[in-house]
Image (cartoon, helix red, strand yellow):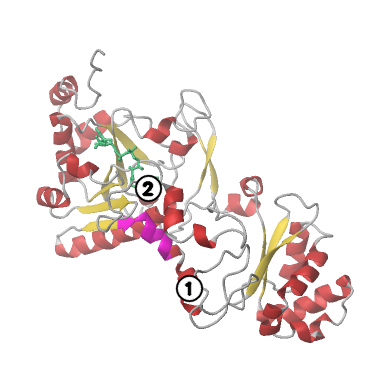
Amino acid sequence: MEALKGVRILDMTHVQAGPTCSQLLAWMGADVIKFEPPQGDATRGQLRDVPGADSLYFTMLNCNKRSITVNMKSAEGKKVFVDLLKKCDIMMENFGPGVLERLGFTWEKIHEINPKIVVGSIKGFGSSGPYADFKAYENVAQAMGGSMSTTGLHDGAPFVTGAQIGDSGTGLHLAIGLLAALHQAGRTGQGQYVEVAMMDGVMNLCRVKFRDHQRLTRQELGEYSVPTYQGMGDVPRAGNDSGGGQLGNAVHCKPHGPNDWIYVVVQEAVWEALAKRIGPEVHHPDLAADPDLAKIADRRRHQAKMWGLLGKFAERDTKREVMAILNEINVPCGPIMSTGDLADDEHVRGRQMYVELDHPQRGKWYNVGMPIKLSASPARIERSPLLGEHTDEVLKDVLGYDEATVAAMKAAGAFSLPPKKPA
Ligand SMILES: CC(C)(COP(=O)(O)OP(=O)(O)OC[C@H]1O[C@@H](n2cnc3c(N)ncnc32)[C@H](O)[C@@H]1OP(=O)(O)O)[C@@H](O)C(=O)NCCC(=O)NCCS
Protein backbone atom coordinates (compact mmCIF):
# COMPACT_ATOMS: atom_id res chain seq x y z
CA MET A 1 0.00 0.00 0.00
CA GLU A 2 1.16 3.54 -0.67
CA ALA A 3 2.66 5.13 2.43
CA LEU A 4 0.46 8.26 2.35
CA LYS A 5 -2.74 6.58 1.15
CA GLY A 6 -5.72 8.37 2.66
CA VAL A 7 -3.88 11.69 3.12
CA ARG A 8 -5.56 14.45 1.10
CA ILE A 9 -3.70 17.63 0.20
CA LEU A 10 -5.12 20.94 -0.98
CA ASP A 11 -2.20 22.09 -3.08
CA MET A 12 -2.24 25.79 -3.96
CA THR A 13 1.45 25.81 -4.86
CA HIS A 14 2.82 27.11 -8.13
CA VAL A 15 6.07 27.42 -10.11
CA GLN A 16 8.74 25.06 -8.63
CA ALA A 17 9.33 25.30 -4.88
CA GLY A 18 5.89 24.15 -3.71
CA PRO A 19 5.10 21.73 -6.56
CA THR A 20 8.37 19.84 -5.90
CA CYS A 21 7.07 19.09 -2.40
CA SER A 22 3.53 18.14 -3.40
CA GLN A 23 4.77 15.92 -6.25
CA LEU A 24 6.92 13.96 -3.80
CA LEU A 25 3.97 13.57 -1.43
CA ALA A 26 1.80 12.46 -4.36
CA TRP A 27 4.46 9.87 -5.29
CA MET A 28 4.20 8.58 -1.75
CA GLY A 29 0.47 8.08 -2.28
CA ALA A 30 -1.22 11.28 -1.09
CA ASP A 31 -4.28 12.49 -3.01
CA VAL A 32 -2.97 15.88 -4.15
CA ILE A 33 -5.61 18.27 -5.45
CA LYS A 34 -3.83 21.03 -7.36
CA PHE A 35 -6.00 24.07 -6.83
CA GLU A 36 -5.27 26.46 -9.69
CA PRO A 37 -6.56 29.86 -10.72
CA PRO A 38 -8.73 29.63 -13.85
CA GLN A 39 -5.78 30.53 -16.10
CA GLY A 40 -3.66 27.82 -14.43
CA ASP A 41 -0.21 27.67 -12.87
CA ALA A 42 1.87 30.13 -14.91
CA THR A 43 4.45 27.43 -15.64
CA ARG A 44 1.97 25.55 -17.86
CA GLY A 45 2.77 28.12 -20.53
CA GLN A 46 6.38 28.97 -19.66
CA LEU A 47 9.32 27.71 -21.78
CA ARG A 48 6.86 25.83 -24.02
CA ASP A 49 8.47 23.36 -26.43
CA VAL A 50 5.28 21.91 -27.97
CA PRO A 51 2.77 24.53 -29.19
CA GLY A 52 -0.44 24.45 -27.16
CA ALA A 53 0.81 21.74 -24.78
CA ASP A 54 1.63 22.04 -21.09
CA SER A 55 5.33 22.82 -20.82
CA LEU A 56 7.88 20.39 -19.40
CA TYR A 57 8.40 22.94 -16.64
CA PHE A 58 4.86 22.11 -15.53
CA THR A 59 4.62 18.44 -16.40
CA MET A 60 7.86 17.53 -14.61
CA LEU A 61 6.71 19.04 -11.31
CA ASN A 62 3.05 18.10 -11.18
CA CYS A 63 2.77 14.37 -11.72
CA ASN A 64 0.18 12.22 -9.93
CA LYS A 65 -1.95 15.26 -9.01
CA ARG A 66 -5.57 16.13 -9.79
CA SER A 67 -6.21 19.63 -11.15
CA ILE A 68 -9.14 21.80 -10.22
CA THR A 69 -9.54 25.41 -11.30
CA VAL A 70 -11.21 27.80 -8.90
CA ASN A 71 -11.53 31.56 -8.96
CA MET A 72 -10.66 32.50 -5.40
CA LYS A 73 -11.67 36.07 -6.08
CA SER A 74 -15.34 35.07 -6.31
CA ALA A 75 -17.60 34.29 -3.32
CA GLU A 76 -18.46 30.85 -4.77
CA GLY A 77 -14.77 30.09 -5.35
CA LYS A 78 -14.04 30.92 -1.72
CA LYS A 79 -16.83 28.53 -0.68
CA VAL A 80 -15.20 25.72 -2.67
CA PHE A 81 -11.90 26.53 -0.93
CA VAL A 82 -13.48 26.46 2.54
CA ASP A 83 -15.29 23.19 1.79
CA LEU A 84 -12.02 21.64 0.60
CA LEU A 85 -10.21 22.85 3.73
CA LYS A 86 -12.68 20.80 5.76
CA LYS A 87 -11.92 17.67 3.72
CA CYS A 88 -8.12 17.90 3.58
CA ASP A 89 -5.29 16.98 5.95
CA ILE A 90 -2.78 19.45 4.52
CA MET A 91 -3.10 22.78 2.72
CA MET A 92 0.02 24.19 1.13
CA GLU A 93 0.95 27.34 -0.77
CA ASN A 94 3.91 29.35 -1.98
CA PHE A 95 2.23 32.60 -2.94
CA GLY A 96 3.98 35.93 -2.66
CA PRO A 97 3.88 37.61 0.77
CA GLY A 98 0.38 38.50 1.97
CA VAL A 99 -1.54 36.88 -0.93
CA LEU A 100 -3.54 34.42 1.16
CA GLU A 101 -4.28 37.06 3.78
CA ARG A 102 -5.55 39.40 1.04
CA LEU A 103 -7.89 36.62 -0.07
CA GLY A 104 -9.21 36.61 3.53
CA PHE A 105 -7.49 33.48 4.84
CA THR A 106 -4.99 33.96 7.64
CA TRP A 107 -3.54 30.89 9.39
CA GLU A 108 -5.84 31.62 12.38
CA LYS A 109 -8.90 31.62 10.11
CA ILE A 110 -7.90 28.36 8.42
CA HIS A 111 -7.18 26.76 11.79
CA GLU A 112 -10.64 27.82 12.96
CA ILE A 113 -12.25 26.26 9.86
CA ASN A 114 -10.37 22.96 10.33
CA PRO A 115 -8.36 22.72 13.57
CA LYS A 116 -6.64 19.53 12.42
CA ILE A 117 -5.38 20.80 9.08
CA VAL A 118 -1.64 21.31 8.65
CA VAL A 119 -0.75 24.40 6.63
CA GLY A 120 2.51 24.51 4.69
CA SER A 121 3.89 27.81 3.46
CA ILE A 122 6.97 28.68 1.45
CA LYS A 123 8.09 32.28 1.24
CA GLY A 124 11.34 33.76 0.03
CA PHE A 125 12.23 35.02 3.49
CA GLY A 126 9.54 33.79 5.88
CA SER A 127 6.83 35.78 7.61
CA SER A 128 9.03 37.84 9.93
CA GLY A 129 12.05 40.09 9.69
CA PRO A 130 13.06 42.94 7.40
CA TYR A 131 12.92 40.84 4.21
CA ALA A 132 9.49 39.29 4.87
CA ASP A 133 7.67 41.37 2.26
CA PHE A 134 9.91 40.46 -0.66
CA LYS A 135 9.19 38.00 -3.43
CA ALA A 136 11.86 35.48 -4.38
CA TYR A 137 12.93 33.12 -7.12
CA GLU A 138 15.58 30.40 -7.14
CA ASN A 139 18.62 32.54 -7.80
CA VAL A 140 17.51 35.24 -5.37
CA ALA A 141 17.55 32.57 -2.66
CA GLN A 142 20.93 31.28 -3.83
CA ALA A 143 22.23 34.84 -3.72
CA MET A 144 20.89 35.57 -0.24
CA GLY A 145 21.42 32.18 1.43
CA GLY A 146 25.22 32.07 1.04
CA SER A 147 25.46 29.75 -1.94
CA MET A 148 26.47 32.24 -4.62
CA SER A 149 29.16 33.97 -2.57
CA THR A 150 30.86 30.61 -2.03
CA THR A 151 30.43 29.19 -5.55
CA GLY A 152 32.69 29.95 -8.49
CA LEU A 153 36.30 30.84 -9.04
CA HIS A 154 38.27 32.72 -6.43
CA ASP A 155 38.88 35.76 -8.66
CA GLY A 156 35.70 35.56 -10.75
CA ALA A 157 32.01 36.43 -10.41
CA PRO A 158 29.81 34.48 -7.98
CA PHE A 159 27.95 31.60 -9.62
CA VAL A 160 24.57 29.96 -9.21
CA THR A 161 24.50 26.18 -9.11
CA GLY A 162 22.47 24.08 -11.56
CA ALA A 163 20.91 22.15 -8.68
CA GLN A 164 17.77 24.04 -7.72
CA ILE A 165 18.59 24.34 -4.05
CA GLY A 166 16.45 27.47 -3.58
CA ASP A 167 13.27 26.06 -5.09
CA SER A 168 13.42 22.26 -5.03
CA GLY A 169 15.63 22.30 -1.92
CA THR A 170 13.02 24.34 -0.08
CA GLY A 171 10.30 21.98 -1.29
CA LEU A 172 12.18 19.09 0.31
CA HIS A 173 12.46 20.96 3.58
CA LEU A 174 8.72 21.65 3.50
CA ALA A 175 7.92 17.97 2.89
CA ILE A 176 9.81 17.03 6.06
CA GLY A 177 7.99 19.68 8.09
CA LEU A 178 4.58 18.68 6.74
CA LEU A 179 5.08 15.01 7.52
CA ALA A 180 6.22 15.83 11.07
CA ALA A 181 3.22 18.11 11.63
CA LEU A 182 0.86 15.53 10.13
CA HIS A 183 2.21 12.90 12.51
CA GLN A 184 1.66 15.27 15.44
CA ALA A 185 -1.85 16.19 14.28
CA GLY A 186 -2.64 12.47 14.24
CA ARG A 187 -1.83 12.30 17.96
CA THR A 188 -3.19 15.65 19.14
CA GLY A 189 -5.96 16.47 16.70
CA GLN A 190 -4.35 19.87 16.18
CA GLY A 191 -2.75 21.09 12.99
CA GLN A 192 -0.02 23.69 12.86
CA TYR A 193 1.59 26.21 10.54
CA VAL A 194 4.74 24.94 8.82
CA GLU A 195 6.84 27.68 7.30
CA VAL A 196 9.99 27.31 5.24
CA ALA A 197 11.84 30.32 3.91
CA MET A 198 13.91 29.74 0.78
CA MET A 199 16.78 31.76 2.22
CA ASP A 200 16.77 29.57 5.36
CA GLY A 201 16.72 26.40 3.27
CA VAL A 202 19.74 27.53 1.25
CA MET A 203 21.60 28.48 4.46
CA ASN A 204 20.88 25.00 5.79
CA LEU A 205 22.42 23.51 2.66
CA CYS A 206 25.46 25.80 3.03
CA ARG A 207 26.10 24.62 6.61
CA VAL A 208 29.74 23.63 5.94
CA LYS A 209 30.49 27.11 4.62
CA PHE A 210 29.46 28.53 7.99
CA ARG A 211 31.78 25.95 9.59
CA ASP A 212 34.59 27.47 7.52
CA HIS A 213 33.42 31.01 8.29
CA GLN A 214 34.00 30.36 11.99
CA ARG A 215 37.25 28.45 11.46
CA LEU A 216 38.61 31.53 9.69
CA THR A 217 38.56 33.42 12.99
CA ARG A 218 41.20 30.97 14.30
CA GLN A 219 43.14 29.63 11.32
CA GLU A 220 43.68 29.54 7.60
CA LEU A 221 41.75 26.93 5.65
CA GLY A 222 44.52 24.57 4.67
CA GLU A 223 42.37 22.39 2.48
CA TYR A 224 41.39 25.30 0.20
CA SER A 225 43.54 25.64 -2.90
CA VAL A 226 43.06 29.42 -2.86
CA PRO A 227 44.80 31.67 -0.32
CA THR A 228 43.10 32.01 3.05
CA TYR A 229 44.29 33.50 6.33
CA GLN A 230 43.13 33.90 9.91
CA GLY A 231 40.82 36.89 10.24
CA MET A 232 40.01 36.96 6.52
CA GLY A 233 36.27 37.23 7.26
CA ASP A 234 34.33 35.84 4.34
CA VAL A 235 34.66 32.28 3.09
CA PRO A 236 36.15 32.53 -0.41
CA ARG A 237 34.95 30.88 -3.61
CA ALA A 238 37.20 27.90 -4.18
CA GLY A 239 36.32 26.42 -7.55
CA ASN A 240 36.03 22.66 -7.33
CA ASP A 241 37.81 22.15 -4.02
CA SER A 242 36.22 19.37 -2.02
CA GLY A 243 35.05 21.43 0.91
CA GLY A 244 35.55 18.45 3.22
CA GLY A 245 38.31 16.84 5.26
CA GLN A 246 39.65 15.02 2.21
CA LEU A 247 41.21 16.74 -0.78
CA GLY A 248 39.24 16.62 -4.01
CA ASN A 249 39.11 18.24 -7.42
CA ALA A 250 38.03 17.80 -11.04
CA VAL A 251 40.58 16.44 -13.49
CA HIS A 252 40.33 16.79 -17.29
CA CYS A 253 40.24 13.61 -19.38
CA LYS A 254 40.32 12.58 -23.05
CA PRO A 255 38.97 13.90 -25.48
CA HIS A 256 38.99 17.09 -23.40
CA GLY A 257 35.47 18.32 -24.17
CA PRO A 258 33.41 20.41 -21.73
CA ASN A 259 32.18 17.37 -19.76
CA ASP A 260 35.27 15.17 -20.11
CA TRP A 261 36.20 15.55 -16.48
CA ILE A 262 36.30 13.30 -13.48
CA TYR A 263 36.02 14.35 -9.86
CA VAL A 264 38.59 12.60 -7.69
CA VAL A 265 38.72 12.52 -3.90
CA VAL A 266 42.22 11.75 -2.65
CA GLN A 267 41.13 10.09 0.55
CA GLU A 268 43.96 9.67 3.06
CA ALA A 269 43.40 5.91 3.14
CA VAL A 270 43.92 5.49 -0.61
CA TRP A 271 46.92 7.74 -1.21
CA GLU A 272 49.53 5.01 -1.17
CA ALA A 273 47.64 2.79 -3.63
CA LEU A 274 46.89 5.78 -5.86
CA ALA A 275 50.48 6.99 -5.82
CA LYS A 276 51.75 3.49 -6.70
CA ARG A 277 49.24 3.22 -9.57
CA ILE A 278 49.83 6.60 -11.17
CA GLY A 279 53.48 7.28 -10.23
CA PRO A 280 55.13 5.01 -12.82
CA GLU A 281 52.91 6.43 -15.57
CA VAL A 282 53.75 10.06 -14.87
CA HIS A 283 57.52 9.56 -14.66
CA HIS A 284 57.49 9.58 -10.88
CA PRO A 285 57.93 5.91 -9.88
CA ASP A 286 58.64 6.84 -6.24
CA LEU A 287 55.55 8.97 -5.86
CA ALA A 288 54.34 6.96 -2.85
CA ALA A 289 57.56 7.90 -1.04
CA ASP A 290 57.61 11.58 -2.09
CA PRO A 291 57.83 13.57 1.20
CA ASP A 292 56.01 16.53 -0.42
CA LEU A 293 52.89 14.37 -0.65
CA ALA A 294 53.38 11.86 2.15
CA LYS A 295 50.60 12.89 4.53
CA ILE A 296 47.37 14.82 4.03
CA ALA A 297 48.89 17.97 5.53
CA ASP A 298 51.76 17.73 3.02
CA ARG A 299 49.36 17.19 0.15
CA ARG A 300 47.33 20.21 1.24
CA ARG A 301 50.49 22.31 1.07
CA HIS A 302 51.49 20.89 -2.31
CA GLN A 303 48.08 20.54 -3.92
CA ALA A 304 49.13 22.06 -7.23
CA LYS A 305 51.85 19.41 -7.64
CA MET A 306 49.47 16.58 -6.77
CA TRP A 307 46.67 17.73 -9.09
CA GLY A 308 49.23 18.32 -11.84
CA LEU A 309 50.36 14.69 -11.62
CA LEU A 310 46.79 13.39 -11.48
CA GLY A 311 45.91 15.57 -14.47
CA LYS A 312 48.81 14.13 -16.43
CA PHE A 313 47.68 10.61 -15.57
CA ALA A 314 44.04 11.24 -16.52
CA GLU A 315 44.61 13.09 -19.79
CA ARG A 316 45.33 9.95 -21.83
CA ASP A 317 42.05 8.16 -21.02
CA THR A 318 38.35 8.94 -21.07
CA LYS A 319 36.51 9.78 -17.86
CA ARG A 320 34.91 6.30 -17.86
CA GLU A 321 38.30 4.62 -18.30
CA VAL A 322 39.81 6.69 -15.49
CA MET A 323 36.79 5.83 -13.34
CA ALA A 324 37.38 2.10 -13.93
CA ILE A 325 41.07 2.40 -13.03
CA LEU A 326 40.40 4.37 -9.85
CA ASN A 327 37.48 2.20 -8.76
CA GLU A 328 39.77 -0.81 -8.94
CA ILE A 329 41.95 0.69 -6.21
CA ASN A 330 38.98 2.03 -4.24
CA VAL A 331 39.53 5.73 -4.91
CA PRO A 332 36.25 7.67 -4.57
CA CYS A 333 35.64 9.37 -7.91
CA GLY A 334 32.88 10.33 -10.32
CA PRO A 335 32.89 11.28 -13.97
CA ILE A 336 31.12 14.57 -14.65
CA MET A 337 27.87 13.26 -16.10
CA SER A 338 26.17 15.51 -18.65
CA THR A 339 22.38 15.52 -18.97
CA GLY A 340 22.85 13.34 -22.08
CA ASP A 341 25.06 10.89 -20.19
CA LEU A 342 22.44 10.60 -17.45
CA ALA A 343 19.47 10.23 -19.80
CA ASP A 344 21.22 7.23 -21.41
CA ASP A 345 22.78 5.73 -18.30
CA GLU A 346 22.04 2.09 -17.50
CA HIS A 347 22.28 2.66 -13.75
CA VAL A 348 19.90 5.64 -13.93
CA ARG A 349 17.33 3.74 -16.02
CA GLY A 350 17.65 0.68 -13.80
CA ARG A 351 16.84 2.76 -10.73
CA GLN A 352 13.90 4.37 -12.55
CA MET A 353 15.42 7.81 -12.21
CA TYR A 354 14.57 8.85 -15.78
CA VAL A 355 11.14 7.52 -16.63
CA GLU A 356 9.15 7.64 -19.86
CA LEU A 357 5.59 8.92 -19.64
CA ASP A 358 2.81 9.70 -22.07
CA HIS A 359 0.73 12.87 -22.21
CA PRO A 360 -2.41 13.60 -24.23
CA GLN A 361 -1.06 16.91 -25.53
CA ARG A 362 2.65 16.24 -25.92
CA GLY A 363 3.06 12.45 -26.42
CA LYS A 364 6.14 10.74 -24.98
CA TRP A 365 8.29 12.64 -22.51
CA TYR A 366 10.56 11.92 -19.59
CA ASN A 367 10.52 12.84 -15.95
CA VAL A 368 13.23 12.50 -13.35
CA GLY A 369 12.04 9.70 -11.11
CA MET A 370 11.39 9.36 -7.39
CA PRO A 371 14.67 9.52 -5.45
CA ILE A 372 13.16 8.22 -2.20
CA LYS A 373 12.69 4.46 -2.46
CA LEU A 374 10.25 2.89 0.01
CA SER A 375 10.60 -0.89 0.02
CA ALA A 376 6.92 -1.64 0.64
CA SER A 377 5.49 1.33 -1.23
CA PRO A 378 7.32 1.93 -4.51
CA ALA A 379 6.25 5.10 -6.34
CA ARG A 380 4.02 4.74 -9.39
CA ILE A 381 4.63 7.76 -11.59
CA GLU A 382 1.68 9.10 -13.60
CA ARG A 383 1.44 12.09 -15.93
CA SER A 384 0.53 15.58 -14.79
CA PRO A 385 -3.11 16.66 -15.10
CA LEU A 386 -4.51 18.96 -17.77
CA LEU A 387 -5.82 22.29 -16.51
CA GLY A 388 -9.06 21.67 -14.62
CA GLU A 389 -9.13 18.01 -15.68
CA HIS A 390 -10.59 16.96 -12.35
CA THR A 391 -12.74 19.93 -11.39
CA ASP A 392 -16.08 18.13 -11.69
CA GLU A 393 -14.70 14.90 -10.22
CA VAL A 394 -13.39 16.66 -7.09
CA LEU A 395 -16.54 18.76 -6.63
CA LYS A 396 -18.71 15.66 -6.78
CA ASP A 397 -16.56 12.92 -5.21
CA VAL A 398 -14.72 14.89 -2.54
CA LEU A 399 -17.22 17.66 -1.76
CA GLY A 400 -20.42 15.78 -2.58
CA TYR A 401 -21.88 18.61 -4.70
CA ASP A 402 -24.74 17.51 -6.97
CA GLU A 403 -25.07 18.35 -10.66
CA ALA A 404 -27.40 21.33 -10.03
CA THR A 405 -25.02 22.87 -7.44
CA VAL A 406 -22.03 22.51 -9.76
CA ALA A 407 -23.99 24.10 -12.62
CA ALA A 408 -25.12 27.01 -10.42
CA MET A 409 -21.57 27.60 -9.18
CA LYS A 410 -20.23 27.48 -12.72
CA ALA A 411 -22.81 30.06 -13.80
CA ALA A 412 -21.81 32.26 -10.85
CA GLY A 413 -18.15 32.25 -12.02
CA ALA A 414 -16.59 30.00 -9.36
CA PHE A 415 -14.31 28.30 -11.88
CA SER A 416 -13.65 30.95 -14.49
CA LEU A 417 -12.19 34.40 -14.86
CA PRO A 418 -14.66 37.28 -14.92
CA PRO A 419 -15.22 38.65 -18.47
CA LYS A 420 -12.78 41.45 -19.34
CA LYS A 421 -14.27 44.93 -18.94
CA PRO A 422 -14.43 46.85 -22.26
CA ALA A 423 -11.50 49.29 -22.48
C1 LIG B 1 6.96 33.11 -7.14
C2 LIG B 1 6.43 34.51 -6.96
C3 LIG B 1 7.59 35.52 -7.04
C4 LIG B 1 5.44 34.78 -8.09
O1 LIG B 1 4.87 36.06 -7.94
P1 LIG B 1 3.47 36.42 -8.62
O2 LIG B 1 3.42 35.82 -9.98
O3 LIG B 1 3.27 37.89 -8.53
O4 LIG B 1 2.39 35.63 -7.78
P2 LIG B 1 1.86 35.88 -6.32
O5 LIG B 1 1.96 34.59 -5.61
O6 LIG B 1 2.53 37.02 -5.62
O7 LIG B 1 0.35 36.35 -6.56
C5 LIG B 1 -0.58 35.49 -7.06
C6 LIG B 1 -1.84 36.27 -7.43
O8 LIG B 1 -2.71 35.34 -8.01
C7 LIG B 1 -3.92 35.32 -7.27
N1 LIG B 1 -4.44 33.96 -7.20
C8 LIG B 1 -3.77 32.83 -6.84
N2 LIG B 1 -4.60 31.78 -6.90
C9 LIG B 1 -5.79 32.25 -7.30
C10 LIG B 1 -7.05 31.65 -7.55
N3 LIG B 1 -7.24 30.34 -7.43
N4 LIG B 1 -8.06 32.44 -7.95
C11 LIG B 1 -7.90 33.77 -8.11
N5 LIG B 1 -6.72 34.40 -7.89
C12 LIG B 1 -5.70 33.63 -7.48
C13 LIG B 1 -3.55 35.79 -5.89
O9 LIG B 1 -4.67 36.24 -5.19
C14 LIG B 1 -2.53 36.85 -6.21
O10 LIG B 1 -3.23 38.04 -6.61
P3 LIG B 1 -2.96 39.45 -5.87
O11 LIG B 1 -1.59 39.88 -6.26
O12 LIG B 1 -4.07 40.30 -6.44
O13 LIG B 1 -3.07 39.25 -4.40
C15 LIG B 1 5.69 34.66 -5.60
O14 LIG B 1 4.58 33.80 -5.60
C16 LIG B 1 6.56 34.34 -4.40
O15 LIG B 1 7.43 35.12 -3.97
N6 LIG B 1 6.34 33.16 -3.80
C17 LIG B 1 7.03 32.74 -2.58
C18 LIG B 1 8.42 32.31 -2.89
C19 LIG B 1 8.48 31.20 -3.90
O16 LIG B 1 7.88 30.16 -3.74
N7 LIG B 1 9.28 31.44 -4.93
C20 LIG B 1 9.73 30.36 -5.78
C21 LIG B 1 8.89 30.06 -6.86
S1 LIG B 1 9.58 28.65 -7.66
Q: Position of residue 87 (x, y in %)?
A: 18, 45
Give the residue furthest to the right. 283
Give the residue number, with chain letter if any, for mark 2: 136
Q: Position of residue 77 (x, y in %)?
A: 18, 32
The answer to whether one can see residue 402 in this image is yes
Q: Position of residue 285 (x, y in %)?
A: 88, 79
Q: Is residue 364 left or right of residue 334?
A: left
Task: Specify the segment rendered in magenta.
Answer: 196-204
The crowding category of the residue bearing disc 1, from other C-alpha atoms within 10 Å (few below 14, some 14 to 19, many at least 20), is: some
Q: Is residue 115 above or below residue 408?
A: below
- Which numbered tag is attached to residue 213? 1
* Mark 2 lies within 8 Å of ligand 1 (Cβ measured): yes
Q: Residue at x 78, y 60 (%)?
A: 321
Looking at the picture, tell me which residue is in the foreground, 260 or 6.
Answer: 260
- Please state which amino acid type lies under the numbered disc 1: His
Choose mark 2 or mark 1, whichever is in front. 1
Looking at the picture, tell me which residue is in the foreground, 377 or 360.
Answer: 360
Q: Indicate the secondary structure of the residue bearing disc 2.
A: loop
Q: Indicate yes or no whether the magenta region holds residue 200.
A: yes
Q: Position of residue 386 (x, y in %)?
A: 38, 30
The answer to whether one can see residue 84 in this image is no
Looking at the picture, tell me which residue is in the foreground, 85 or 363.
Answer: 85
Q: Indicate the secondary structure of the residue bearing disc 1.
A: helix
Q: Answer with mark 2 or mark 1, whichever residue precedes in sequence.
A: 2
Q: Indicate yes or no whether the magenta region holds residue 321.
A: no
Query: What secondary structure is the magenta-colored segment mainly?
Result: helix
Give the residue furthest to the left. 112
Q: Residue at x 62, y 60 (%)?
A: 155
Q: Residue at x 34, y 31 (%)?
A: 40
Q: Looking at the image, do the residues carrying marks 2 and 1 touch, with CB atoms under 8 Å apart?
A: no
- Please state which amino acid type lies under the numbered disc 2: Ala
The crowding category of the residue bearing disc 2, from other C-alpha atoms within 10 Å (few below 14, some 14 to 19, many at least 20), is: some
